[in-house]
Amino acid sequence: MRIKEQKTYLETLKKYERKFESKELDLYKMLLKRHKDDEELDKLSMEKLKNLYTKYHLNREKKNYDHLFKKIDEDPQQ
């Protein structure tokens, strides 16, 4: 379970790699290298990975814009 979890974190953080500060980038690369070596992260490393994830990944709600579009009636009698 942890390997699957760390994979999702690392894949998500890949999008934000260019926004990292130098220390964060070094940490990310180190964690990525450990992941590629099929190594499960220890508790401290996993915590650092989660902190990076919470710092950069914002989980936003998808807005509903249906009210902006009019629906066309299919009934030709009107």
Image (cartoon, rainbow, N blue to C red):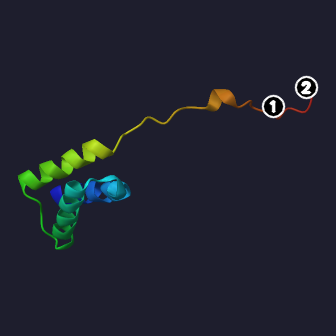
Q: Can you say whether 55 is above or below 3 in the image?
A: above
Return the residue nearer the eye: 48 or 68: 48
Q: What amino acid type should be assigned to the residue bearing mark 2? A: Gln
Return the residue nearer the eye: 11 or 22: 22
Neighbourhood count class around disc 2 (C-alpha, 10 Å): few under 14, some 14–19, many 20 upward: few
Element at label 1:
loop
- Count of numbered tags: 2
Residue 21 placed where, x, y %?
26, 53
Residue at (27%, 43%) from the top-left corner? 55
Residue at (11%, 60%) from the top-left corner? 41
How far apart marks 2 and 1 lie (CA) works out to 9 Å
> In the displayed image of the protein, which residue is found farthest to the front?
22
Q: Can you say whether 19 is above or below 61 in the image?
A: below
Position of 22 with respect to 39 (left or right) is right
Position of 78 with respect to 60 (left or right) is right
Q: Residue tagged by mark 2? A: 78
Residue at (26%, 42%) from the top-left corner? 54
Q: What amino acid type should be assigned to the residue bearing mark 1? A: Asp
Q: Are marks 2 and 1 in contact (CB under 8 Å)?
A: yes
Q: Is residue 31 visible?
A: yes
Q: Residue tagged by mark 1? A: 73
Give the mark, 2 or 1, whose residue is nearer the N terminus.
1
> In the displayed image of the protein, which residue is found farthest to the bottom?
37
Element at label 2:
loop
Residue 58, quarter of the rendered image? top left
Q: Can you say whether 59 is above or below 37 in the image?
A: above
Q: Is residue 1 visible?
A: no
Residue 57 placed where, x, y %?
33, 45
Residue at (34%, 53%) from the top-left corner? 19
